[in-house]
Amino acid sequence: MDLFMGDGTIQSVFFNKGELTFDKYYIRTEKILYEEENGKLPDNVFIKVFLDYLYTLKLFPNIMGVANTALLKIKNRIYALYERDMPYLLKIDWMKKRFETIH
């Protein structure tokens, strides 16, 4: 389950004239931002169900913030997607070979 439900991660390899650059980037989801400020959420199914309920009431951020199922490009914008989360707009810096979450 963790393999598919972990934090939103992009693993990439940039190719440039035979040189490979590996990058691993955590998408700045609501969950990641919350945990950076308040500490890691408990790994307890009952707490997760309760916090997900609070999210539906708009009282808590989305704890399912994983956004790592696919990347989608629409009109030169790249989004990270996941079925239970909103799309996250990403920026790819081709010169620095890095990803960045915009919104």
Image (spheres, rainbow, N blue to C red):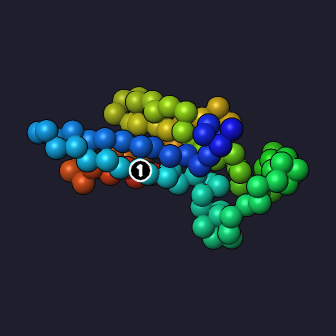
In this image, 57 relative to 89: left or right? right
Residue at the image position 11 percent from the left and 39 percent from the top? 17
User: Considering the image in quadrants, where does the N terminus appear?
Assistant: top right
- How far across and how far down the image is residue 84, in percent? 68, 36
Q: Is residue 32 at all visible to an observer of this figure?
A: yes
Q: Quadrant of residue 40?
A: bottom right
Q: Is residue 86 at all visible to an observer of this figure?
A: no
Mark 1, secondary structure of its residue: strand
Q: Compared with residue 64, is residue 76 higher up or lower down, i.e. above or below?
A: above
Q: Nearer the viewer, residue 43 or 60?
A: 43
In this image, 41 relative to 92: left or right? right
- How far across and how far down the image is residue 54, in percent? 84, 52
- How far across and how far down the image is residue 5, in percent? 65, 41
Q: Residues within 10 Å of mark 1 (few under 14, many from 20)?
A: few
| Mark count | 1
Residue at the image position 26 percent from the left and 41 percent from the top? 14
Residue at the image position 39 percent from the left and 36 percent from the top? 77
Of the residues shown, which amino acid type is indicated by label 1?
Lys
Residue at the image position 47 percent from the left and 37 percent from the top? 79
Q: Which residue is mark 1?
A: 24
Q: Quadrant of residue 42?
A: bottom right
Residue sticking out furthest to the left: 17
